[in-house]
Amino acid sequence: MVMDFIGREGVTVNPYLRLRDKELKTIHSASMELLTDPGIELSHEEAADIFDKAGATVTKSERAKGTWVVKIPEKLVLQALETAPSQVTLGARNPEHKLILDGETPRVYFGSGSETNNILDTNLEEFTSTSDPDKKLKFPVHKRRRGMVADLCAAARLGEHLEHLDFFIRPVNIQDDDISEDSKDVNKFYACLNNMTKHVMAGLTDLNQLDNIIRMGEIITGGPEQLKENPVMSFITCVNKSPLQLEGDSTEKMLSIIKRDMPVVLSSSPQGGSSAPIDEVGMVAQINAEILAAVTLSQLAHPGAKVIYGSVPVRARMDNLHDMYGAPEFNQYNIDCVQMARYYKLPCYSTGGVADAKVPGVQATAEKVFSHLYVCMSGPHLLHYAFGLLEETQTFCFEQAVLDNQHIGMVKTLMQPPEVSQDNVSYSLDVVRKVMNTSHRLFARYARKRIHSGQLFLAYPFEGGEIQDETMANAKAETQRILAEPVEHLTDATSDQIFAEIPGILDRIK
């Protein structure tokens, strides 16, 4: 569907289709069967009442006190899909960074995530060759440390200047001694919004802080109506606990968020081989059922609630049952889920670009770039985890984020459609004929226009000039250059009002 577009351009793809139409319908039918047999379990009484009043079969679970088994008929799911918006707008402090997610238009935006516990610092140290003592070379030496709120501020500043980062999910779990569970949410949202004019997305640690976070958005945008028009922040709820359970605390958060008319990702993250089947069809049928259960609940509670189909399927590494993001199956799962979301015309939040490798290098690049490219080809609206993540989302590395930014730019260029028009054909034929009439028969002079437009890839920006890999040295220099650049902070008056009305934000991040 063609529409007037205002905001970040992203990249609109001609989507790669892994599943055929018949297979999409087959998986939909399988998901519907799961929602009636065995159904889903939930531990939230209000949600059980909502399903019961809407016509689902709700019974008390015999397995655990305070839980219910809900069997959801297909007609309820289809009714919910009728009211779920196919278009959701995510705002930004700078309107030029607005994101429009349209369930019928495969426009891809790349974003960061997740909430890692570790920061990986990279330093260059000089080493002497044992075979040639006169030969001294510099190599990166890495050190892992605990993430702090200063790191989150720096990550937001970095992300503000990364050209290909379209939205920001905090990549660092802030673990400062003077930040409590009560004050974590207000500090992480303020740290992001004060250093970033792009869209900010995060989960809630403490539901009691939801009103404070929304009030922060109202102060920044100018009021309640302005925030609804320009939601500078949105939320993520991991509402599903696989297999086939709606988790009580996250369900409460989701219902509270949609009651306030804010956009929210309904996320499910089953692990193939442990909490979901490892085979592709079984995995996708289950995660699709889980997400549709959450979508159905959201629309029964508040028809028209701005929800996003949040698919984060991962595969288990079978020797230790850790998440495994570098496996080809991870990408297959995610592409299938993107297609299922588009089948329902729902905005999609997908996953790609994580390395299992612990440090930047060949393994990290291979795992990340395959995923960046392959999942992007399917056309998700939000592709998160794409910047700086290593060690199965446990570690964030600033230099890796800078490298990822460059690689994502190359992916975006790859996804650009060909420019085939009669004018282009006529121009090209004219150039060929002119060159054939010269003695040198070179096309170089005709490449200048393309070079000057800035659209032509000239060289890998981190390459070195010696017989040595200088990528990390150059990436570190670029990281330091970017972090020294200024950002557009909130005005003093806005920050003063936020600090006056919302308790718990640390003075040192103002």
Image (cartoon, rainbow, N blue to C red):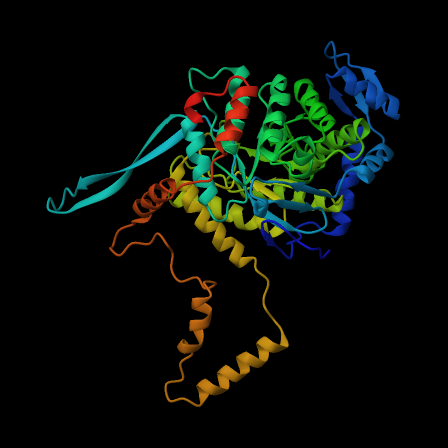
Residue 322 visible here: no
Residue sitting at 87 percent across and 35 percent down? 75
Residue 331 in percent (x, y) is at 58, 43
Which quadrant holds the N terminus? Answer: bottom right
Q: Closest to the observer: 105 or 140? A: 105
Residue 418 in percent (x, y) is at 58, 66
Left or right of 461, for residue 505: right
> Is 213 located above or below residue 344 in the figure?
above
- Most extreme residue toward the top is 65
Which quadrant holds the C terminus? Answer: top left
Q: Quadrant of residue 136?
A: top left
Q: Closest to the observer: 68 or 181? A: 181
Residue 320 in percent (x, y) is at 49, 27
Residue sitting at 74 percent across and 21 percent down? 41
> Is 417 located above or below residue 252 in the figure?
below
Left or right of 98, for residue 30: right
